[in-house]
Amino acid sequence: MDIEYLIKELDLQPHPEGGFFKEVYRSTGTIGSESLDSRYSGKRNYATSIYFLLTSDTFSAFHKINQDEVWHFYDGSPIKIHMISEDGEYSYVIVGRNLKDGEKLQFVVPGGSWFAANVINQNDYSLVGCTVSPGFDFKDFQLADRNELIAQYPKYKEIIFNLTIA
């Protein structure tokens, strides 16, 4: 599929972390603040989901949210999700459809982890879905500051430099 077609057909908009997105689901039910832990301020919807599109020319910059985030592969190139856990350990997973090579159709990024993503194939795109529960709110979103993240995790300097916004 053509990238411009997907952007238009799915009504995708630029995302602050990079790439393009469209929220496609937000539950009507909510969880009261008294039932959420101290990381959350205010109530949250039960769940939310988005379409998320990256191209070879874009990436999802290192960021973190409070919630676990489930990535679902739909189309295009496999995508590499880079993570730095709350314990400071780096890992990655490939989300795609080549199960023989260990790619995952779905993967859960643990809440509180720094994570970023990039398209593996050149001149290609990755179309995925992301589901979050409790539902996403930009109050829960923190875009990494390149220098601060490198200072915190100097052994990952190269990957952080390549996947952060200057």
Image: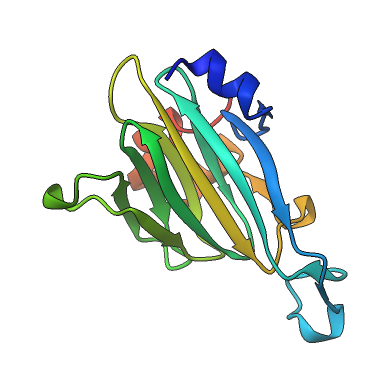
Q: Nearer the viewer, residue 110 or 133?
A: 133
151 left or right, relative to 106: right
Q: Is residue 58 left or right of residue 41?
A: left
Identify the residue at the far left of this view.
100
Identify the residue shown where x is 30% and y is 44%.
96
Residue 101 in the image: x percent, y percent?
Answer: 13, 48
Left or right side of 84 for 40: right
* Residue pictured at 39% horizontal, 59% vertical: 107
Foreground of the two, 82 or 133? 133
Q: Is 49 above or below relative to 146? A: below
- Figure quadrant of residue 57: top left
The residue drawn where x is 64% and y is 19% is 8
Judging from the image, the colouring scheme is rainbow
Q: Quick one: which residue is furthest to the bottom in this view?
A: 35
Quarter of the image that includes the N terminus: top left
Residue 59 horizontal/vertical position (percent): 48, 29
Quarter of the image where the C terminus is located: top right
Corner quadrant of residue 144: top right
Q: Residue at x 42, y 41 (%)?
A: 74
**Total marks drawn?**
0
Q: Nearer the viewer, residue 25 or 111?
A: 25
User: In the image, is 165 to the left or to the right of 161?
Assistant: right
Residue 50 appears at what percent x and percent y?
A: 62, 46
State which quadrant residue 123 falls in.
top left
